[in-house]
Image: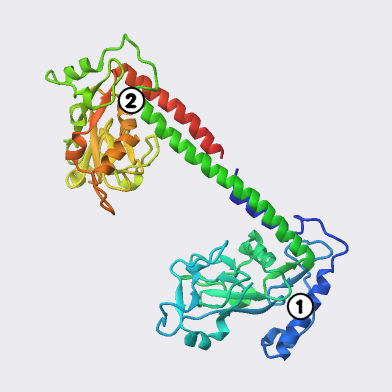
Amino acid sequence: MDTKALRQKILDLAIHGKLVPQDPNDEPASVLLERIKAEKERLIKEGKIKRSKKSAKTSDTPHYENVPFEVPESWMWTTIEEICSKIGSGSTPRGSNYSANGIPFFRSQNVYNDRLVYDDIKYISEEVHQKMKGTEVLANDLLLNITGGSLGRCAVVPADFNCGNVSQHVCIMRSVLVEPEYFHVLVLSSYFAKSMKITGSGREGLPKYNLEQMGFPLPPLTEQQRIVAEIEHWFALIDQIEQGKADLQTIIKQTKSKILDLAIHGKLVPQDPNDEPAIELLKRINPDFTPCDNGHYTQLPDGWCYATIKEVFIINPKNKADDDVEVGFVPMANITDGYNNTFKYETKQWGKIKTGFTHFANGDIAVAKISPCLENRKSVVLKGLPNGIGVGTTELHVFRPLFLDVQYGLYFFKSDYFISQCVGSFNGVVGQQRVSKNIIENMIIAIPPINEQKRIACAVHKIFAKLDMIMESL
């Protein structure tokens, strides 16, 4: 379920008058608009607001011949300017005159659709605030970002808000006798996004005049209140769905980790007594191979044995090729953290990249050695490379299996066991760290018989495919 699209649909239904039924007993929007005009006249006479140049020329109720869309009979089309007593952006204190504390000063990075964010909030002194009274923020104002990449983000100032100011990148919209939350609904709707007439080629902006003249579908006041209550009801249900979705995604992630843990400990598929024991395979690789002392490790199933990583992999091998041969170049950013071996490469000539990078070939396993890429399980089986070879960042370790199923090897490197062993080597050091070859090569890996390795890899693949189907359906 696309909950983001569902939220947008609810907002659009709301401003079209299709979310809640109309009540013939409601005071019509035409009467509300007259009351808004009267209230604005009172504020003008008391010197609390100034008459706009447009309203000084005409006091007629605006009439739309070509409305953006049809609204119910009890509604009325007007403009944002007509229902606001203030529309205007702020300014930045001269010399960025901020204080350690005092009056909150909101910039575009503090304005989000669901709230005001106080992370990285700036403050101005009371003295500076008094000089910037014209940009004072009041409770129930709407703050709208009008420039830059966050243009269109809008928050309602809480009813218990004290005072604050805004920068020139944020516009204050102060409605008169209109529910701020309904106004917010309009701003978050797709209609508002499509109606914004943005100017500028560098840092784009929404001019004040374009904002003022934007059409406003005005419902009766009591219907505005019903709309807000209905949206709160539906959004609360969607929040529950999203939380359930997030919980299920976490469970699926944990399930995959558990499956890998079972796989590398011989508990995912049954053993077959007819399989050649792993120790025989390892002795073919190295006749002098001696298995690790089982007394120090978990008891393994029959046919399995312990080895070190350097005994079953060639670590960071080197390639040889003619300089004009085309090969694959794989940046770290192109290696995924999933389990499907997806990666992209760029084609380059071997002579230009053979030094200064990590070498690999088809069938190798590339594993991130730097946190947090390592902890995010950035590792992949390389395949389909031009001429079978390539290079990547030096932040990769490369493992070439010796008589070991490559997919089983990849699942080992993605397991919590391997990751925890690597992270443990950082000894609590905070920040970006690298796990060295010396640490990895002596790690212990449990080796099943080769046929069981293939059965394990097949079982993991099938289970993960089903879990991925569930994830995709969320």
Q: Decide which of tag 2 and tag 1 comes sooner along the chain.
A: 1
Identify the mark at residue 238; answer none if there is no mark: none
Q: Amino acid at mark 1?
A: Ile
The quarter of the picture where residue 272 lies is top left
| Residue at image point 57% right, 61% down | 114
Quadrant location of the N terminus? top right
| Relative side of 204 to 219, left or right | left
| Residue at image point 49% right, 85% down | 126
Coloring applied to the structure: rainbow
Separation (CA) of disc 2 from disc 1? 73 Å
Quadrant location of the C terminus? top right
Q: In this view of the protein, which residue sits in the foreground, 41 or 352?
A: 41
- Mark 2 = which residue? 265
Q: Residue 243 appears at what percent x and percent y?
A: 56, 46
Q: Residue 29 appears at what percent x and percent y?
A: 81, 70
| Residue at image point 58% right, 66% down | 154
Q: In this view of the protein, which residue sits in the foreground, 150 or 438?
A: 438
The quarter of the picture where residue 153 lies is bottom right
- Label 1, secondary structure: give it: helix
| Relative side of 471 to 58, left or right | left
| Relative side of 425 to 462, left or right | left
Which numbered mark, 2 or 1, is in the foreground of this view?
2
Q: Residue 284 appears at what percent x and percent y?
A: 17, 17
Number of numbered discs visible in the structure rendering = 2
Q: Residue furthest top?
A: 274
- Mark 1 = which residue? 36
144 over 226 or under it: above or below: below
Q: Amino acid at mark 2?
A: His
- Label 2, secondary structure: give it: loop
270 over 44 or under it: above or below: above
Q: In this view of the protein, which residue sits in the foreground, 50 or 319?
A: 50
